[in-house]
Image: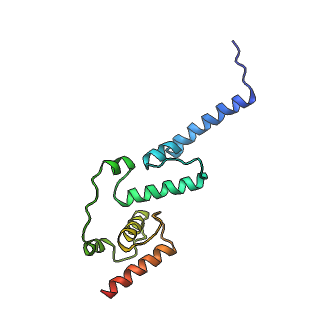
């Protein structure tokens, strides 16, 4: 029995095989990444916008000390500490050495200083300005 394949069918099979190989080599698929970080893909947004929003979810979850969305959901809510004790958690040196530390600072700044930083783990000009604002508030006390 001969199987006849059209060019488009053969192309679809090849593309599927390549995607499976890439998934194994590169890691998680889009849906697996979405599930890992608790993100629901929005078809009304561009892939770049969706990836950026998923990264925000990831940074928020990691900033709270969890490794994935499931752990975050299962974990207990963080207990609110008095403001002065929370300020002690902020490192005395620039926290940009790792994305996780930067994300933690961004989250803390938003929660405690009324900031509106994107929690992406990237030390950019807005995060630097927020850090300088926090430093100056410490010097005033």
Q: Nearer the viewer, residue 26 or 60?
A: 60
| Residue at the far top in the pictured view | 1
136 in relation to 57, above or below: below
Q: Residue 119's spot in the image, x, y percent?
A: 45, 64
Q: Nearer the viewer, residue 43 or 120?
A: 43
Q: Residue 111's spot in the image, x, y percent?
A: 36, 68
Choose top left, top right, bottom left or bottom right for residue 97: bottom left
| Residue at the far right in the pictured view | 7
Task: Work out which quarter of the rendered image holds the N terminus and state it.
Answer: top right
The residue under the point 50% across, 42% down is 31
Choose top left, top right, bottom left or bottom right for residue 140: bottom left
37 in relation to 60, above or below: above
Taking 125 as reference, is 88 left or right?
A: left
Q: What is the image's colouring?
A: rainbow
Badge count: 0
Q: Residue 65's spot in the image, x, y percent?
A: 34, 58
Taking 43 as reference, is 28 left or right?
A: left
The residue under the point 54% across, 41% down is 23
The residue under the point 45% across, 69% down is 116
Q: Nearer the viewer, residue 82 or 89?
A: 82
Can residue 29 be seen? no
59 in relation to 134, above or below: above
Can residue 133 be seen? yes
51 in relation to 113, above or below: above
Task: Work out which quarter of the rendered image holds the C terminus and state it.
Answer: bottom left
Q: Residue 34's spot in the image, x, y percent?
A: 48, 47
Taking 39 as reference, is 81 left or right?
A: left
């Amino acid at each position: 029995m001969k199987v006849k394949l059209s060019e488009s069918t053969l192309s679809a099979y090849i593309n599927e095989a390549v995607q499976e190989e890439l998934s194994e080599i590169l890691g998680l698929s889009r849906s697996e990444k979405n599930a890992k970080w608790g993100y629901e893909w929005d078809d009304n947004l561009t892939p770049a916008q969706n990836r950026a929003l998923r990264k925000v979810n990831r940074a928020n979850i990691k900033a709270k000390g969890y490794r994935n969305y499931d752990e975050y959901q299962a974990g207990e809510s963080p207990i609110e500490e008095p403001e002065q004790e929370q300020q002690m958690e902020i490192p005395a040196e620039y926290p940009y050495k790792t994305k996780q530390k930067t994300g933690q600072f961004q989250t803390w700044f938003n929660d405690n200083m009324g900031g509106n930083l994107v929690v992406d783990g990237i030390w950019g000009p807005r995060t630097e300005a927020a850090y300088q604002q926090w430093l100056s508030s410490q010097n005033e006390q």
